[in-house]
Image (cartoon, helix red, strand yellow):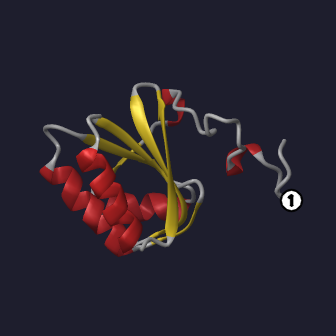
Amino acid sequence: MTGAAIVRWESAGAVVLAVHGAFDGASAWTLRHDMDESPGAEFIVDLTHAVEACDFAASLLGAWSRQRRRSKRVRFRPGAPEHATLLVAYGLEMVEEDEGVASVLPYGFPTPRSMTPSGAPV
């Protein structure tokens, strides 16, 4: 069982997998399985809703991305500077800010970047 909910949608030609909760070993295995089973080739793992990020999760997906680099590409949107540091340490690729990938769920739920510090939508 994972410590996170994984929300999936498509944006800018990529499958976006948003982690809501802990980016831990269980959620990394779930992400890995979802990407293996998907016919898609481009994936973005969005950690803007992750409450924590673990080394084991980053190492699992780092190994997976190296094994599948010819058929699948995974990039990450870190939710905090610590996430970016962790992901880069395992050789994982980041999404560029200007790539135009939607950071809002298809039904218009706000992301942390579109909310005030009190949690109210902007």
Residue 121 position, x and y percent, is: 83, 45
Seen in the picture, residue 1 relative to 40 is either above or below; the reply is below
Residue 83 shown left or right of residue 110 in the figure: left
Q: Quadrant of residue 89?
A: bottom left
Residue 90 position, x and y percent, is: 29, 62
Q: Residue at position x 33%, y 74% from top?
A: 56
Element carrying mark 1: loop
Looking at the picture, tell me which residue is in the foreground, 13 or 54: 13
Residue 108 shown left or right of residue 9 in the figure: right
Q: Residues within 10 Å of mark 1 (few under 14, many from 20)?
A: few
Residue 98 position, x and y percent, is: 53, 29
Q: Residue at position x 53%, y 36% from top?
A: 97
Residue 92 shown left or right of residue 84 in the figure: left
Looking at the picture, tell me which residue is in the foreground, 36 or 49: 36
Residue 6 position, x and y percent, is: 49, 55
What is the quadrant of the C terminus in the image?
A: top right
Q: Amino acid at mark 1?
A: Ser
Total marks shown come to 1
Q: Residue at position x 16%, y 37% from top?
A: 71
Looking at the picture, tell me which residue is in the foreground, 38 or 59: 38
Q: Residue at position x 42%, y 74% from top?
A: 1
Residue 88 shown left or right of residue 67 in the figure: right
Seen in the picture, residue 120 relative to 10 is either above or below; the reply is below
What residue would you read off at disc 1? Answer: 118
